[in-house]
Image (cartoon, helix red, strand yellow):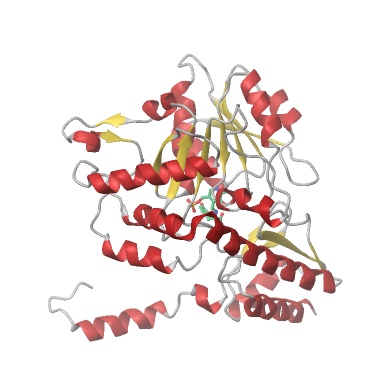
């Protein structure tokens, strides 16, 4: 009911806070599968101060446009490209939809049944993209490490193929597909290759200096056409912040819609959304400037140490296991003897919030900065109780 008479501010805030008690907050440590975390303080400050800025109207907000451009270039630098083309978006889903739109728009219009090829482990938003864009999605088999098999992808290519999608940091296990091999196939067949680095984009570039293996995934591979990455995941930016980067200008032009009644750069609409917040983009810029590579590396080092703590807890218990050694701060927990749904249900009653990955069946643990050692230990203590 929308009442005639308004309530005092205090009462409204009390009502709100009562209902929001149902939310699981990051500082409780309960959301163990979330890919977002409490944003960096500076990001919160910048977003709060710039809530009125509209990234869909850059003719009015020209400073915001400049900051978006600088952010795109910083991310390009991280992904080893000097002059990236691209746009900010609302998240990994929108970035994948736009990357697929670019594949469709740069392909020949005479193709009968335009098809995207992707390994089985591709994120559900790629299926959503194919659905929305009226394209066919052909999924290929994966290897025993849950990575795409390049030969399977090559064999799946037909005259209907318009692009290949793969992942650097899969949703289920944080695995990285063999991008150099797939990029070389894409190059040979003159097909666009999109790398979904929504999660891995802010992790992989920092792993090598920390002494972890860091599989190649970026524009150093000539066959990589586009990469998406989400600052609102490991970039610690407020939601919604994602970027889609292209190596060349053409695909970006192909997804740009001209809206002549709007002036200046407002007339070039590149994202799916019209009016959208510039605040998270400005916050991303601020956090990247403030932390520098060193700051992110330190955060990832802590997350990786905490991932190893989780691995130790798993190794200690005979009914727990992992399908692969974690590549990044994301792991799948296998459980012997009890259905995962039953365990997740019981833990949910105690406050924990988690996701169950299907390939292979695991509880997904994303060791975001809010998953500190106390929360990890409390989670495993509870999990072990549920096993008996
Ligand atoms: N790509 C990868 C590899 C992802 O893990 C995610 C997020 C996305 C793209 C989509 O990102 P946005 O949520 O920013 O659009 N994966 C999360 C997950 O699967 C969140 C999620 C879940 C997003 C379901 C969309 C969805 O339909 O848990």
Please name whichever residue, 203 or 112, is drawn nearer the observer in this view of the structure.
203
Would you place residue 98 above or below residue 186 in this image? Answer: below
Image x and y of residue 129, in percent: 48, 39
All told, the count of numbered labels is: 0
Q: Quadrant of residue 339?
A: bottom right
Residue pushed farthest right? 318
Please state if 183 lies on the left or on the right of 11 as rendered. right
Please state if 258 lies on the left or on the right of 261 as rendered. right
Please state if 100 lies on the left or on the right of 212 as rendered. left
Residue at left offset 52%, top offset 18%: 112
Residue pushed farthest left? 4
Would you place residue 317 above or below residue 206 in this image? Answer: below
Residue at left offset 58%, top offset 20%: 160
Can residue 96 be seen here? The reply is yes
Image x and y of residue 355, in percent: 61, 63
Please name whichever residue, 245 or 340, is drawn nearer the observer in this view of the structure.
245
Q: Quadrant of residue 181?
A: top right
Q: Quadrant of residue 319?
A: bottom right
Residue at left offset 51%, top offset 73%: 26
**Which quadrant, please, contains the C terminus?**
bottom right
Residue at left offset 72%, top offset 81%: 381
Please name whichever residue, 162 or 89, is drawn nearer the observer in this view of the structure.
89
Image x and y of residue 29, in percent: 57, 76
Image x and y of residue 333, in percent: 73, 64
**Which quadrant, please, contains the N terminus?**
bottom left
Would you place residue 105 above or below residue 196 in this image? Answer: above
């Amino acid at each position: 009911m929308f009442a005639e008479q308004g309530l005092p501010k205090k009462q409204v805030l009390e009502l709100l806070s009562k209902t929001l008690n149902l939310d699981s907050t990051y500082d409780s440590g309960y959301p163990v599968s979330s890919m977002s975390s409490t944003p960096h303080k500076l990001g919160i400050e910048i977003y709060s101060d710039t809530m009125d800025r509209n990234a869909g109207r850059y003719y009015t907000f020209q400073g915001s446009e400049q900051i978006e451009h600088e952010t795109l270039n910083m991310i390009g630098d991280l992904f080893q490209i000097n002059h990236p083309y691209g746009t900010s978006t609302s998240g990994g889903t929108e970035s994948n939809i736009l990357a697929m739109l670019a594949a469709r728009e740069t392909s020949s219009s005479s193709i009968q049944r335009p098809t995207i090829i992707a390994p089985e482990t591709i994120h559900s938003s790629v299926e959503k993209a194919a659905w929305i864009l009226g394209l066919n999605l052909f999924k290929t088999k994966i290897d025993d490490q849950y990575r795409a098999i390049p030969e399977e992808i090559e064999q799946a290519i037909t005259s209907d193929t318009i692009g290949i999608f793969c992942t650097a940091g899969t949703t289920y296990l944080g695995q990285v597909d063999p991008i150099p091999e797939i990029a070389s196939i894409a190059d040979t067949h003159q097909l666009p290759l999109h790398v979904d680095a929504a999660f891995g984009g802010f992790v992989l570039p920092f792993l090598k200096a920390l002494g972890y293996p860091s599989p190649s995934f970026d524009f150093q591979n000539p066959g990589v056409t586009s990469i998406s990455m989400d600052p609102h995941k490991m970039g610690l930016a407020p939601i919604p912040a994602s970027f889609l980067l292209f190596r060349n200008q053409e695909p970006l032009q192909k997804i740009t819609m001209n809206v002549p009644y709007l002036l200046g750069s407002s007339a070039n609409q590149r994202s799916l959304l019209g009016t959208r917040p510039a605040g998270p983009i400005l916050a991303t810029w601020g956090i990247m400037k403030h932390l520098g590579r060193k700051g992110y590396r330190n955060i990832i080092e802590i997350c990786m140490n905490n991932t190893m703590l989780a691995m130790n807890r798993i190794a200690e218990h005979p009914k727990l296991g992992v399908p692969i050694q974690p590549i990044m701060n994301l792991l799948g927990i296998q459980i012997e003897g009890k259905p995962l749904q039953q365990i997740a249900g019981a833990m949910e009653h105690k406050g924990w919030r988690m996701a169950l990955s299907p390939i292979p069946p695991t509880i997904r643990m994303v060791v975001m900065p809010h998953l500190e050692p106390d929360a990890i230990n409390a989670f495993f203590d509870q999990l072990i109780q549920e096993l008996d």
